[in-house]
Amino acid sequence: MSTPTWNRPAAPEKSILSPEDAEELDIISLGRRIRHLRKAKAMTLDDLSEAVGTAPSQLSLMENGKREPKLSMLKSLASVFGVGLEELLGAEPPTKRAALEIELERAQRGPLYQALGLPKVRISSRLPMDVLESLVGLQGELERRLNEQSATPEEARRANAELRGEMRERNNYYPEIEKEASKVLKAIGHATGPLSHHEVADIASHLGFSLHNVSDLPHSTRSVTDLKNMRVYLTQSQRSEHSTRSVLLQAFGHHVLGHATPSDYAEFLRQRVATNYFAASLMMPEKATVEYLQRAKNARELAVEDIRDAFAVSYETAAHRFTNLATEHLGITVHFQKVHESGIIHKAYENDGVNFPMDHIGAIEGQSVCRHWTSREVFDVADQFSAYNQYTDTTAGTFWCTARTERSTTGKFSLSIGVPYVHVKWFRGRDTTERSISTCPDESCCRRPPLELQKQWAGQAWPSARAQTHLLAAMPQGAFPGVDETEVYSFLAQHSGDK
């Protein structure tokens, strides 16, 4: 899907670029070019400061790639250096040394270097060229070997990271899917309120499908769609009415959105996200849901559990749907987490700058979240009926989060929605006195035992870990990972003659 322009705010005056181009402005490279041109003019920071009318400290931040200059400042710098804006913003580093410095700076700001927990090397003109080349070479070789040694499941993690980046860029809002869902709802005359099972059957009829409950559905599937005979098969033992309705709507989504057999795991994942979005758009129509959310925001009573109850969906569906609409329609940036009781992140989304833990390729799934975050603290709360609300001071700022726990066949999970402090005024639960402090990724925050416990037990304990089978398992093969296609085809052949 191409990234549309409708969901991007206009560029503020202070920035040279609009938000869609902001990532393309490499402020590290720009800073090195400014430094190179300043030194070519034999100017000190004080000299340049006087020439362009800003503090030396601000110029130093620009040269170190820690501040994006305003357009007016870039024009002043270009004038002082006697170059055009195009040259100042050029893509090529001015010298080989500058190229190495840029590469090392990028590496030290990346998740791989941060995960190593090493101190940052101060990059200056006094750093010998051979040392600079060695550091860049070592970083490149380390990343190459990590990528080379990645097991098959790494493909899934990489695809997840790439898709999450696209979702963040679009604020998790897909108008083309909203449009298709709206057409279907209009065809059956549904506008607001919970989508009944009778209306789901109407959708099936409108799309030309017949529904069949069977007891022998392939064990690796939740539903099977027979496109030859326009049938949808599902089991009679779905866990709840919520899940039955969702499974059917997701199956319809593949048909309505025109999906072809996925060519790789990344495409499979995109299709799954799209059909989940489509199903949520049917159960919680955009117009009706936005009107409901706007009323709640005006009353400063936004609450995920209220959205869940108003549209008779699961808490997880309501939370996901909130992330679809909150930024686009309410101007609220947000993050979502689904975390196992072990602390492992299973699902996550953010466009509010929260510092999720991630590996060297930017993958979040499978990472352990800080013990002091709301999504972990909620497991220790006695009241598991009410929403648990908490403020958490992090290295990326203060966030307010609301969370609940749910049980599944694989254990207990927390589902949490969080926003930066600036947006908490719109939410019920903002008056909570629960507060926590997280300094992650600093290991002293929660990844190492407290000093007293270390003194008492270090060297005196030898735990036997549970087998981490996910470390050994290869990603399922085939167009539909995890599905036994032989079993599916045999099932369809057996039922194709049914009336």
Image (cartoon, rainbow, N blue to C red):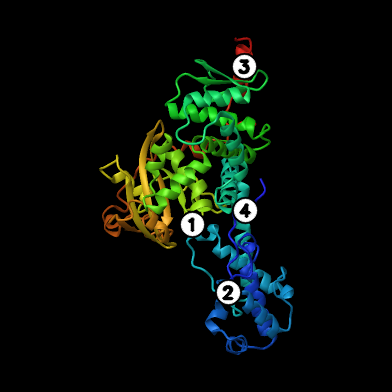
Judge left or right: residue 318 versus residue 147.
left
Judge left or right: residue 381 versus residue 266.
left
**How far across and how far down the image is residue 93, in percent?**
70, 71
Disc on the earlier residue, 2 or 3? 2
> Looking at the image, do the residues carrying marks 2 and 1 touch, with CB atoms under 8 Å apart?
no
**How far across and how far down the image is residue 37, in percent?**
69, 81
Amino acid carrying mark 4 in the image: Trp
Q: How far is disc 2 from disc 1 in space, using C-alphas? A: 25 Å
Judge left or right: residue 240 versus residue 228.
left
* Viewer-nearest of discs 2 and 1: 1
> Looking at the image, do the residues carrying marks 1 and 3 touch, with CB atoms under 8 Å apart?
no
Which quadrant of the figure contains the C terminus? top right
Disc on the earlier residue, 4 or 1? 4
Q: Which label belongs to residue 6?
A: 4
Q: Which residue is mark 1?
A: 352
Disc on the earlier residue, 2 or 1? 2
Instruction: In this rendered view, identify the residue nearer to me: 113 or 109.
Output: 109
Q: Which residue is mark 3?
A: 492
Secondary structure of the residue carrying tag 3 is helix
Amino acid carrying mark 3 in the image: Leu
Instruction: In this rendered view, identify the residue nearer to me: 66 or 16.
Output: 16
Q: Which residue is at 57% across, 24% downward?
A: 204
Disc on the earlier residue, 4 or 3? 4
* Viewer-nearest of discs 1 and 3: 1
